[in-house]
Amino acid sequence: MFCLGGQNYVYLVCGRLMTMKRLISLMIGALSLGVMAQLPDGSVATDWTAIDIDSTEWNLQSILDDGKTVILCFEATWNAPGWNYHQSNILQDLYDLFGPAGTDDLMVFFMEADESTTLNDLYGTGASTVGNWVEGTAYPIIDNADGIFFNDYAGAYYPTIYTICPDGILSESIQPDFATLESMIFSDCVPCSDYGLSAFPTGCEGCTDATACNYNEEANVDDGSCLVNDDCGVCGGDNSTCSGCTNENADNYDLTMILDDGSCHYDQLAYEDNYSIGYIAGLASVENPNDLCQGDLTADGYIGVDDILAMLSLFDTFCELSPPLWQCGGEVSYEGGHYETVQIGDQCWFAENLYTTFYADGTSIPEVTNDSIWAELVTGARCDYGNNSDNVSTRGRLYNWYTVNDARGLCPTDWHVPNYAEYTKLKDYVDSQGYSGLVGAALKSVNGWPNGWGGIDEFGFSGFPCGYRNSSGVFFGVNEGGAGSFVNFWSSTSNYGFPDRAWYRGLSTHYLDGYYYDKRFGHSVRCLRDE
């Protein structure tokens, strides 16, 4: 036991002696928690050159110059909390998706930063290790990185994780989840105003149609917000500002109006003095202040036999009754399935994932289980997570984006796959209801997530973790126990800057994240009622 800053620290070492060097290192680390911070967010990362355990040389600045983001995970092989984080495969999943074999926007480095450990410790066979750190780790591992850690990056504790943007600006996160790191990589690194100055992809939403009245020259992702001028010259208007009564014989004539909306009214005197003009301008809208013409069915200004005959002509006629008006919250039957719905703001959503095996026109959607075939598809296909039909009842089915975009339709009549802007509208509404920064938690299901990750399902959206299938046909996101880490929902919005990718929204922790994936990915689908 030793005391630093009024705090007692006890280190019990089982089965081996702790070296004085490691003890001193730990004491320094413990002391630094109270008197010394890591590099503050916004610092410029120090350049370094190092050789990994496979004898490949890496230079930080060269990677940044290629427009990539870099994640550095400084670790010690004996650190149990770091081992638990390593076992979550969050960094590996990010590397698979966005590293050289994915979108090639990211590099991840494992930096072993305790000089007293050995290469055997990395492989799990030494005396100072909690496991095999190399097995299953595809991203580079650099041993003996303690000089970089303590001298250049203000090392204080393990693990320390820095995300470095292509401009060299870094930020630290404490054992971040997948969604947090993804957001740091693709939302925080390059502002919209810098798009075009960097090879690094951004997500700058707005109107990309140069002919629209609200065209945004900085936008590279069309969010469906483009508008045109109405006949009154108002951007996105509905002609209401210049619509009214344009007949000068009406008592509510407005000479400033250019579009007639059928609202003209004529007093009794005007009607009697000028029948033909009143009739042409809209006899059905004639106001009769004395209420003497309520039974004038033939609209001739006289209640007589013709009006009686008009009524009798309808006698003994059976009328077809309109079906009861469907209201959101009711069930929707579609292709043999029955889906619950939920009203959130002024949007009506499916409250569960789509699991149809047919397009809206009744054509079958091909099921593809083979990984290699899935990876080559440029047409619609579906699958069950893990190719296990037992997952359908809780997780629905996964569809590639070509299915979403098929002209035959994927959702029932009066429903559609929402575009990216409509998911943003959902996010903004939930955010406005007191869930700022907690939109994901409010939309996630209570069950199905790892301990501590479950949501509160405040709005009945019931976002159940379903995982996904990547462009190589490999499934991710659900562990052997059945708990899932995230659920991604396709939007109908393609990425115009990257034609082979489309936009999605995903639930992981507290956020409703948005980014784009290869169109061959298999994601979940929710349907939204047409407005």
Image (spheres, grey):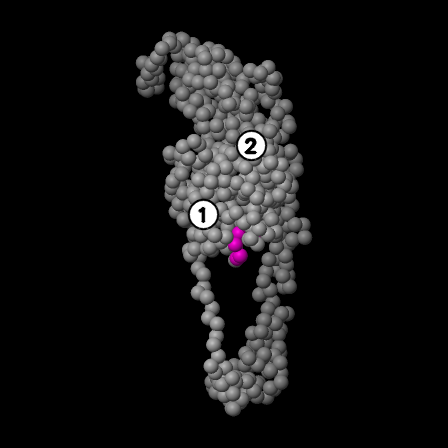
Q: Quadrant of the N terminus?
A: top left
The amino acid type found where label 2 is placed reads: Leu
Quarter-of-image position of residue 167: top right
| Rendering coords of residue 190 (x, y %) | 58, 35
- Total numbered badges shown on the rendered structure: 2
Vertical comparison of 325 with 171: above or below:
below
The majority secondary structure of the magenta stretch comes to: loop
Q: Which residues are magenta?
A: 409-414
Q: Residue at x 54, y 17 (%)?
A: 142
Q: Is residue 242 visible?
A: yes
Q: Is residue 190 visible?
A: no
Q: Residue at x 52, y 23 (%)?
A: 137
Circle 2 is placed at which residue position? Answer: 97
Circle 1 Cα neighbour tier, 10 Å, few/some/many (<14 / 14–19 / ≥20): many
Q: Is residue 413 located in the magenta-colored stretch of the structure?
A: yes
Q: Nearer the viewer, residue 212 or 476?
A: 476
Q: Residue at x 64, y 50 (%)?
A: 215
The answer to whether marks 1 and 2 mark residues whose Cβ atoms lie closer than 8 Å is no
Which element carries disc 2, helix, strand or loop? Answer: helix
| Rendering coords of residue 186 (x, y %) | 56, 35
Circle 1 is placed at which residue position? Answer: 352
Q: Nearer the viewer, residue 113 or 484?
A: 484
Circle 2 Cα neighbour tier, 10 Å, few/some/many (<14 / 14–19 / ≥20): some
Vertical comparison of 368 with 411: above or below:
above
Residue that lies at the very extreme toward the right in this rendered image: 211
The amino acid type found where label 1 is placed reads: Glu
**Labels 1 and 2: the sequence-earlier one:** 2
Q: Nearer the viewer, residue 292 or 401?
A: 401
Quarter-of-image position of residue 201: top right
Q: Is residue 304 located in the magenta-colored stretch of the structure?
A: no
| Rendering coords of residue 58 (x, y %) | 60, 19
